[in-house]
Image: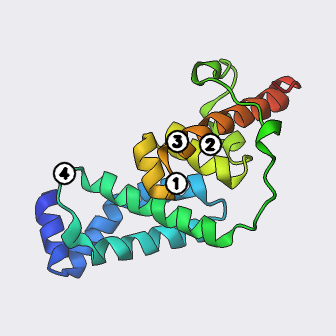
Amino acid sequence: MIQSDLIAACRANNRRAQIELYRKYSQGMYVVSRRYISNPDDAEDMVQEAFIKAFQKLDQFRGDVSFGAWLKRIVVNRCIDFLKSQKERLIELKDHHVHVVEDDDWTVEDGVSADDVIEAINELTDKYKDVVQLYLVEGYDHGEISEILGITQSNCRSRLLRGKGHLKNIINEKYYGTGS
């Protein structure tokens, strides 16, 4: 079945079409969910809830982006909402204790894999982790991130720069035994 026909059938509440669409995208969306949610069961729940929401809001899908990109945004938003509901308030470091790095100051040595970077991102506090994850891993721009997280673009840029600074320190400490 052609994807546009499949989506049209899903809009008509055709269960077989919904199952087919779910099978087509569920594994990829689970991978996206696991980038945010460490518990596999919770990650699966986020995918399930995202699909339910997608099927309920399918009339809002206009086709200006691919269905996969539209669904991915729903999954990411659902994961972020879940994390916000789960996280405990952490005492943040005062700004003068945070080393801000310039955008071109953040590089990763050849010996550090993408999995190592993702693991290091997961060690960041949620304030920085969400922005760094959305920017570096998911490829969202500042406008999209600020919309998803409900923060200003200026705040997004600031968190990204600080988050990259923390990320650089984590990687240096973990893989080279030195901070900054």
- Marks 4 and 1 sit apart, C-alpha to C-alpha, by 25 Å
Instruction: Give the number of the disc on residue 134.
Output: none
Residue 14 sits above or below residue 97 on the image: below
Residue appearing at x 72%, y 51% in the figure = 125
Residue 16 vs residue 71: left or right? left
Residue 107 sits above or below residue 161 on the image: above
Q: Amino acid at mark 2?
A: Arg
Q: Which residue is mark 1?
A: 151
Q: Nearer the viewer, residue 150 or 107?
A: 150
Image-quadrant location for residue 157: top right
Q: Residue 99, position in %: x, y? A: 76, 31
Residue appearing at x 81%, y 57% in the figure = 91
Q: Amino acid at mark 3?
A: Ser
Q: Amino acid at mark 1?
A: Ile
Q: Residue 61, position in %: x, y? A: 21, 63
Instruction: Give the number of the disc on residue 64.
Output: 4
